[in-house]
Image (cartoon, grey):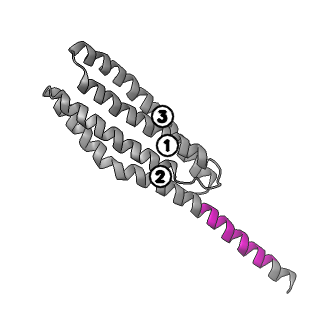
């Protein structure tokens, strides 16, 4: 085999390896995002219902939604935890940031449950203050997760949609 042929074969193999690594990073990103998309309709419905029940004074329903969503978000967290991060730059950081954002989401439902189970208006007010803080924390965690996802994509040669 001529030297030129060897160089062409080596170049082709390098491109194939790079393509496989890029594909595994993209597949990981898509698997994580699929989990988020899977739970989004339930989150949207819960948020609408909680607001309506709270305004109507149906606090037992607020608590029930909080409990149900707590379990659902925890199930999603558990499913994401078992997805193995590929051996790619920034993959583990992206996964950790995503899990942290979801943990704050779960915390929101925990507070909803507490609001619903509060026995006095004063207790509910305290929980509303806690909810405000948890929501601020979640906003920051989501920003951190998005930044981690951008770093992951850039480090592994794919674009976010």
Rendered location of residue 153, percent (x, y): 57, 52
Determine the secondary structure under disc 2.
helix
Asked whether 10 or 41 is in front, the reply is 41
Residue 141: which numbered mark, if any? Answer: 3
Whether the residues at callouts 1 and 3 have beta carbons within 8 Å, the answer is: no
Is 46 situated left or right of 38 in this image? left
> Where does label 2 land, which residue?
32
Circles 2 and 1: CB atoms closer than 8 Å: yes
Magenta span includes 147:
no
Q: Position of residue 28 (x, y in %)?
A: 53, 56
**Residue 136 in the image, given as x and y percentages of width and height:** 41, 27
* Secondary element at image label 1: helix
Q: Is residue 34 found left or right of 20 in the rendered image? A: left
Residues under labels 1 and 3: Cα distance? 8 Å
| Residue found at the far top of this picture | 122
Residue at 48% over, 49% down: 80
Name the image quarter holding residue 59: top left
Q: Earlier in the sequence, mark 2 or mark 1?
A: 2
Around disc 3, counting alpha carbons within 10 Å, would you say few (fewer than 14), some (14 to 19), or many (20 or more)? many
The region drawn magenta spans: 7-22
Q: Work out how far the residue at label 2 is from the one at label 1, CA to CA, in angstroms.
A: 8 Å
Q: Is there a contact, CB below 8 Å, between mark 3 and mark 2?
A: no
The residue labelled by disc 1 is 98
Q: Quadrant of residue 50?
A: top left
Q: Is residue 121 left or right of residue 110?
A: left
Name the element at disc 3: helix
Residue extending furthest bottom? 1
């Amino acid at each position: 085999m001529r030297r030129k042929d060897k160089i062409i074969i080596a170049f082709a193999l390098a491109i194939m390896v790079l393509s496989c690594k890029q594909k595994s990073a993209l597949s990981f990103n898509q698997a994580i995002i699929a989990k988020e998309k899977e739970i989004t309709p339930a989150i949207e419905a819960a948020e609408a219902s909680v607001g309506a029940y709270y305004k109507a004074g149906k606090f037992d329903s607020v608590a029930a939604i909080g409990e149900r969503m707590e379990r659902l978000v925890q199930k999603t967290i558990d499913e994401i935890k078992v997805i193995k991060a590929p051996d790619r730059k920034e993959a583990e950081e992206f996964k950790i940031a995503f899990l942290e954002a979801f943990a704050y989401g779960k915390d929101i439902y925990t507070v909803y449950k507490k609001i619903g189970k509060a026995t006095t208006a004063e207790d509910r007010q305290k929980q509303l203050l806690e909810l405000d803080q948890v929501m601020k924390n979640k906003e920051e965690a989501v920003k951190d997760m998005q930044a981690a996802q951008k770093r992951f994509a850039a480090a592994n040669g794919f674009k976010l949609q």
